Amino acid sequence: MKINWDALGIGASLACAIHCAMLPLFLSTLPLFGINIIENVAFEAGMIVLAFLIGSYSFYHGYKKHHHSSIPFLIFIAGFSLLVLKQIFHQYQLWLLIPAVVLIVTAHLRNYRSCRVHNHAHADDCDH
C-alpha cells in the first residue's frame, strides 16, 4: 500500500481550516464538559507541526524522486508562514488562515501534478 503524501497534506490542510473556522461555532459547548481544544495552544502547535512534517516530506519526496522543482515547496513555505503568523496575530486569524490554506493546498496540488507529469525524472543530483 502506497501513501499519497500530497493527498494526505491536502486533507490535513483542509482539516486544519475546518478546525480553525468551524469548530468554534459547532463545539462551543465543550468547555461545559471540561474539554477545551478551541483555544488550546498545545493542540494548535501540534496541528501546525504535523502539517509541516507531512508537507515537508511530501515536497522532499516529489522534488527528489520526480520533478526536481522547488516551486511547490516555496508556495508551501509561503502558506505555512501565514499559518504561523495566524498564531501570533490572533486578531487577524481569519484573514491569515484563508490565504494560508489556499497556498498550502495549491502547493500540494502543484506537487501532485508535477509528480504525475514527470513520473520518475532523473537529473545529475539523482541518487537512486
Image: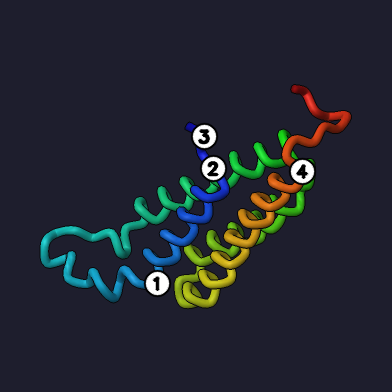
Place of residue 106 in the rendered image (x, y in percent of width and height, measured from the top left): 63, 62
| Residue drawn 67% across the image and 50% down it | 111
Distance from the alpha carbon under mark 2 to that under mark 1: 26 Å
Residue designated by label 1: 21
Mark 1 nearby-residue class (10 Å; few <14, some 14–19, many ≥20):
some
Q: Which mark lies nearer to you, 2 or 1? A: 2
- Report if the CB atoms under discs 2 and 1 are less than 8 Å apart: no
Q: Quadrant of residue 108?
A: bottom right
- Whether residue 53 can be seen here: no
Amino acid type, label 4: His
Residue designated by label 4: 118
Q: Which mark lies nearer to you, 1 or 3? A: 3
Q: Classify residue 98 as left or right of residue 30.
A: right
Circle 3 sits in a helix, a strand or a loop, which is it?
loop
Circle 1 sits in a helix, a strand or a loop, which is it?
helix
Q: Nearer the viewer, residue 46 or 111?
A: 111
Sequence order check, earlier mark of 4 and 3? 3
Mark 4 nearby-residue class (10 Å; few <14, some 14–19, many ≥20):
some
Amino acid type, label 3: Lys
Distance from the alpha carbon under mark 2 to that under mark 4: 16 Å
Sequence order check, earlier mark of 2 and 1? 2
Amino acid type, label 2: Asn
- Kindly identify which numbered label has been placed on residue 2: 3
Q: Quadrant of residue 58?
A: top right
In which quadrant will I find the C terminus? top right
Amino acid type, label 1: Ala
Place of residue 61 in the rendered image (x, y in percent of width and height, measured from the top left): 65, 37
